[in-house]
Image (cartoon, coloured by chain):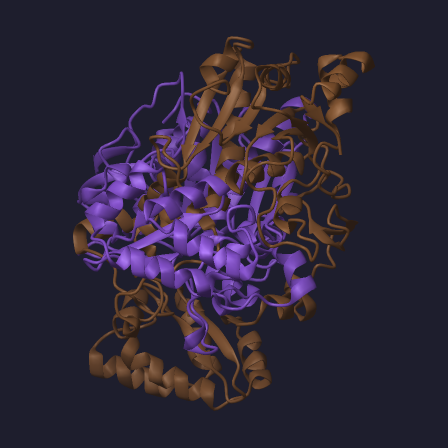
Chain colours: A purple, B brown
């Protein structure tokens, strides 16, 4: 936790990745995050991956450092408690992150009746509010028909990284700070709505892909080839897979020289009447002529020799490796860095957990905190934030309206 | 542009997706963004996709609404101009976004000598500062060995979406606002460093995948199956691909009922001694037993019939469709929405361009602005921000230190 946002208090009613990761990002820069769940856990409480005993490693990853409050949200009295927590006073409180339905007791309209300057950040699936998850949005937007090699016919290839979820979470954290900044200056709260599908559509638009499809039609499958410049996987003499990329002229020159390909590349340029150095697009247009040169050159050398050559010339490259090899053997991806802290987690497992991805110079990086057990902070949050007495908290327990870990 | 961040002024010296999209997100909430490029354009000036005349649709997508200043950055006088723009006074200025090298004239140390409260957000490839791009980071972190079907052997499958770039850009915008917020309260500037590789590692950690790999080893390829619950692509009687997902109990029940699969699913549960409704993980463990039931049921019905059944029960699903079909035919992804504005772009093409993905209730969404032509605002920015006289600006042109569009 950084002392960057330490005066902020966020309340989260959310599940899965996008909205919980938004609040996680805020927590990891120092904000207090109170996550409210139904008694027994929300929809994501058992999401895989899980530990041997079934405890969710996903849940304890996405809720690190948050305070957990468990309330029976199916009953009016429980809902009232949640509303009171969300709209509790304080100049740096009144910040709410959710992916619960727009209508009902957690609507911004209903909540802001209790606190007019409330900022609500609401993650949606489709922009209409209809439910969607990363994998249904991704199917709908066409990327699975662009992924993989052309020879697999028309079968879609799903991504395994829920990129739209993660991106929506980070953008939501940005949007929350923007709305909070405006509130500080104007006194006005507002609801910020952010749909996974709009994030996907805007992202493709920002990268020029909507202009492209309107002009040229759908991008076909290019396998592992980088679109529009030089890049692909190649295989070394000792069977390792390497990704090579050359977008700038300097990257291209360094790559060609590293593999002693100046002569055949120059011959190809003369034949075709193009300059691969001057025009990155020509490297893509003529990739089927270029790739065999690189296949032979890379395939003739073992990885240690390739590594030495690539590093000597600053080539943009990487081996392909498994995640386990990455964290165990690659110093660039080592967990032995201030980004990670070794912690005991609610699952009972002990493993390194990441803090904020960014490093803020001039601010102390304080230890990453484990996720709570469900309801671990119910009593103390109700006492602190709503000033409920021990007697009143006991009554709520007796009525089954709240639960503690 | 929203009137949310309209008092902020950002200077960007950057290329490609991550850092430019950071500044784009800020611009699309109202900030002024001045992008400084070398005369003739930066490394991303010709990045594909391109229009027929070679103009980059990518560049004009990622730089919408920014003001463009072109300076000869290879000469000391040009570098001095850039430093003056970056460190110009003003309480809401002194915000700098870059992916240029850490060392040299754009180092935070050198810049903050001119403006001690400068906030620099620096996007890195590897955390050491060594260069990397999305596709080399992604190769190194193992996802290409998890993507696609097991029967393709050990060949890596690259993602086609530069997810780490996009995520780093959104997170960088969040980090910039966090640092600016701290500066408002403490008067202190700082450098925020954000490596693509740390974003990737932290993201996998947040989702439980580092705990998973340490506990269970590398996740194999599961094809298009959703990890840990029920989900996969299926094919309708009329040959359409659909993605079906069921994570919650309610989603599962709705899906099973929509396809009249209650009896065979119950029989399978009895045989296996499990409850698919109660335990989402069992749906994954026994997916090879479940999938044939769904293949037959989906394969027996044409898409219109499936659509009616799925919609009646709120099933989490989508057709797979191409991007061109998505924007032309799917109302959920239509460009005819306030998120997009029809604009004339520097390429000469006219097409709809996206604004901010989020919708801020209670704030006006004003029109999206096209990207600048390179150097379009050189003269006016130097006059406004540095108060240079027309005579001085003329001298800089004569010396070849600046260029205008």
Q: Hey, which residue is sitting farthest bottom in the picture?
A: B300
The C terminus of chain A lies in quadrant: top left
Choose top left, top right, bottom left or bottom right for residue B8. Answer: top right
Figure check: B27 above or below B204:
above
Q: A324 left or right of A113?
A: left
Choose top left, top right, bottom left or bottom right for residue B152. Answer: bottom left
Q: Hey, which residue is sitting farthest right in the picture?
A: B390
How many numbered marks appear? 0
Q: Is residue A386 visible?
A: no
Q: A88 left or right of B399?
A: left
The residue lying at 31 percent from left, 83 percent from top is B266
Q: B118 left or right of B350?
A: left
Most foreground residue, B294 or B131: B131
Q: A1 left or right of B186?
A: left
The residue lying at 69 percent from left, 23 percent from top is B400
Figure check: A90 above or below A61:
above
Provide residue A249's location: percent of width, then percent of height: 49, 42
The residue lying at 32 percent from left, 66 percent from top is B280
The N terminus of chain A lies in quadrant: top left
Provide residue B99's location: percent of width, then percent of height: 49, 32
Provide residue A321's location: percent of width, then percent of height: 26, 52
Figure check: B362 above or below B383:
below
Most foreground residue, A20 or A88: A20
Provide residue B186's location: percent of width, then percent of height: 51, 12
Figure check: B266 above or below A76:
below
The residue lying at 52 percent from left, 61 percent from top is A271
Q: Is residue A117 visible?
A: yes
């Amino acid at each position: 936790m950084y002392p960057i946002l330490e005066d902020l208090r966020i309340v989260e009613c959310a599940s899965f990745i996008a909205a919980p990761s938004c609040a996680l990002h805020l927590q990891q820069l120092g904000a207090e995050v109170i996550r409210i769940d139904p008694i027994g856990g929300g929809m994501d409480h058992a999401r895989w991956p899980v530990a041997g005993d079934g405890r969710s490693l996903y849940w304890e990853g996405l809720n690190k450092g948050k305070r957990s409050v468990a309330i029976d949200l199916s009953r009016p009295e429980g809902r009232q408690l949640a509303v009171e927590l969300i709209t509790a006073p304080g100049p740096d409180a009144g910040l709410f992150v959710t992916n619960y339905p727009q209508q009902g007791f957690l609507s911004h309209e209903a909540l802001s009746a209790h606190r007019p300057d409330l900022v609500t950040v609401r993650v949606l699936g489709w922009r209409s509010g209809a439910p969607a998850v990363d994998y249904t949005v991704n199917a709908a937007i066409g990327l699975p028909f662009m992924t993989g090699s052309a020879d697999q016919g028309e079968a879609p290839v799903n991504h395994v990284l829920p990129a739209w979820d993660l991106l929506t979470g980070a953008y939501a954290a940005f949007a929350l700070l923007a709305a909070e900044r405006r509130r500080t200056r104007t006194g006005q709260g507002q609801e910020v709505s952010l749909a996974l599908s709009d994030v996907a559509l805007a992202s493709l638009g920002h990268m020029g892909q909507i202009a492209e499809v309107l002009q040229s039609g759908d991008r076909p499958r290019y396998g592992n080839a980088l679109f529009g410049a030089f890049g692909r996987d190649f295989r070394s003499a000792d069977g390792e897979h390497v990704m090579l990329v050359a977008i700038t002229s300097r990257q291209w020159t360094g790559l060609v020289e590293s593999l002693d390909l100046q002569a055949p590349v120059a011959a190809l340029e003369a034949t075709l009447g193009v300059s691969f150095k001057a025009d990155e697009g020509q490297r893509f247009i003529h990739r089927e002529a270029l790739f065999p040169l690189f296949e032979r050159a890379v395939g003739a050398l073992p990885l240690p020799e390739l590594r030495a050559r690539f590093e000597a010339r600053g080539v943009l490259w990487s081996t392909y490796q498994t995640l386990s090899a990455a964290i165990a053997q690659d110093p660039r991806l080592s967990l032995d860095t201030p980004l990670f802290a070794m912690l005991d987690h609610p699952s009972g497992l002990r493993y390194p957990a990441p803090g904020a991805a960014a490093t803020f110079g001039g601010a102390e990086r304080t230890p990453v905190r484990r996720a709570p057990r469900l309801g671990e902070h119910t009593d103390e949050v109700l006492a602190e934030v709503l000033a409920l007495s021990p007697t009143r908290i006991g009554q709520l327990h007796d009525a089954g309206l709240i639960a503690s870990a």
